[in-house]
Image (cartoon, rainbow, N blue to C red):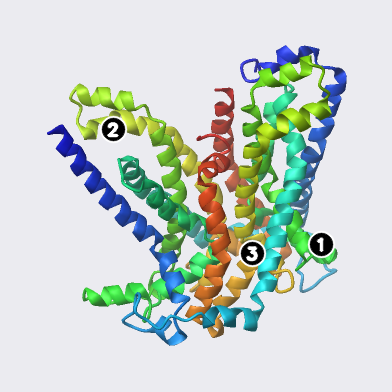
Amino acid sequence: MARMATTRRVVISTIGAWFFGFLIFFPILWMVLTSFKTELEAFAIPPSFLFFHWTTENYVTVQERSDYFHHALNSVIIAGGSTLIALLIAIPAAWSMAFSPTKRTKDILLWMLSTKMMPPVGVLVPIYLIYKSFGLLDSRIGLVFILCLGNLPIVIWMLFTYFKEIPRDILEAARMDGATIGRELVYVLTPMAIPGLASTMLLNLILAWNEAFWTLNLSTSNAAPLTTFIASYSSPEGLFWAKLSAASTLAIAPILVLGWFSQKQLVRGLTFGAVK
Amino acid sequence: MAAFFPQAEKLGMATRQTQILARSLLMPAVGLLFIWMIVPLALTIYFSTLHYSLLDPGSEEFVGLENFRYFLTDPAFLASLQNTLVLVGSVLALTILLGIPLALLMDQPVIGRNFVRLMVIAPFFVMPTVSALVWKNLLMHPVSGLFAWLAKLVGLTPIDWFTDAPLLAVILIVAWQWLPFATLILLTALQSLDEEQKEAAEMDGASAVSTFIYITLPHLARPITVVILIETIFLLTVFAEIFVTTGGGPGLQTTNIAFLIYSQALIQFDVGSASAGGLVAVVIANIVAFFLVRIVGRNLEA
């Protein structure tokens, strides 16, 4: 009896979970399917789900007409650049707070967290004016800088929670053996910190890739990453569903893959370690 | 403090050199974040006391609190404050009320759970401009959208989402983006719930409902709080979804505080009033942040 109940439970919950999972995923699937239709079929009613004339012409057109790769490259540079710089600043800081804490470390950490709570609109005006006067509007370097600062608190926090999990005994043993700080860092800490570093980097890349407040407000064409590029499809004259879908599919594909790899760390990073 | 940093005492013999090094490693991050926090905020405060229009440069003059009076008594402010509250409240309610059952379902013995999890988490990785445009066109278009087709299929009149229920449309899009976040956090919390405790309750003859109410729900209280606070911080400043779908309209129907400030600054070029609005947004966010920082801080001690 108990066994049957368990089997029934597995069947029901499996069907339920797959049904709702599919429902949530469906808009993405629909977008990918639409990207392989002709514009006429993309708009057709009733819609065809699989039996349409599959074509890749939208992907070709998106590149030819709007220089997709230019914007993709911008996204790579802006997300990658801001992540790298944030890591360079955050690693020493997190290392210092995790391994040489002082009485004020906790306050510093919480203060850093509170800078992340500042709504970007609160400082939109001065940032826009500063960027305007320094010629940083629509520049990659300007976006790299602002996204780096915006994500720095999350990066420091994530690294801190990872570093704190490195067992102290190993460090102490290394110190007893007379390891210098440099050697301790290179031979003992780095190998143990790599998984944490990797997931911090991944999460930060995702956040920077998808950031759509500063990119929309501070870039127009030259430095426009994919978020701004896709937004240009919102004008009525740009309404080509199949091409919008093709451009969107390309824009989210790499990050979807990275995201799926990092989903476990996501919870920890986005809750500042409050939920693990 | 001692429990939180046990090594502080153990490494009491750490050389002074180490401490100096540690402090100098911390300085760049602290310095940058300090500048990042203070300079723009100080400028916002300064601008908020000026009559300052980008259309009329050079005519800045000190007007005291006039901008605040203007911003706070502007009918657009009340409308956008109301829209902001409705948006935040509805998205929170949707993501949590749907997220709890979804997390409970995924916590069951499900065949292929990892794959289901991938499907559920996917919307979170879609950039806001993409999800907004895909929903607006492919799904919510009043003639050729999938929803219109489905409505006709069951004999209903299709809804012209962005004309008749624009705020609801934005709410649905944003809720779709945040449902994965709530579900994933609640699922993570559920998986750390002690199985034995649940089994013991079942042995004692507790029904599934009372197990849920007396064991599962209290266990979820903290993660739910965390979800509410973190989502609120992001939802208070929803921008891209409105920017690419409605542009705040029709009228002011989908203008939230963030969008109102944006349009005053970069469409009407009224720096003073936008700055005053920016400070109002900062104050609202700080009220939320206060509670979040306390919860996270308590977690540091544990």
Picture layout, residue A175 above or below residue A141: above
Near mark 3 (Cα within 10 A), the count class, few <14, some 14-19 or many ≥20, is many
**Residue B262 numbered mark, or none:** 3
Percent position of residue A267, x then y:
51, 42
Q: Chain of mark 1?
A: B
Mark 1 highlights which residue?
B61
Mark 2 highlights which residue?
B213
Q: Are marks 3 and 1 on the same chain?
A: yes
Which residue is at a point 40% across and 77% down the rendered structure image? B141
Horizontal side, residue B271 vs residue B195: left or right? right
Mark 1 and mark 3 in contact (Cβ < 8 Å)? no
> Disc 3 vs disc 2: which is toward the camera?
2
**Secondary structure beneath label 1:** strand
**Residue A29 numbered mark, or none:** none
Mark 2 and mark 3 in contact (Cβ < 8 Å)? no
Locate the N terminus of chain A by quadrant.
top left
Which residue is at a point 44% across and 65% down the rendered structure image? A28
First of labels 1, 2 by sequence position: 1
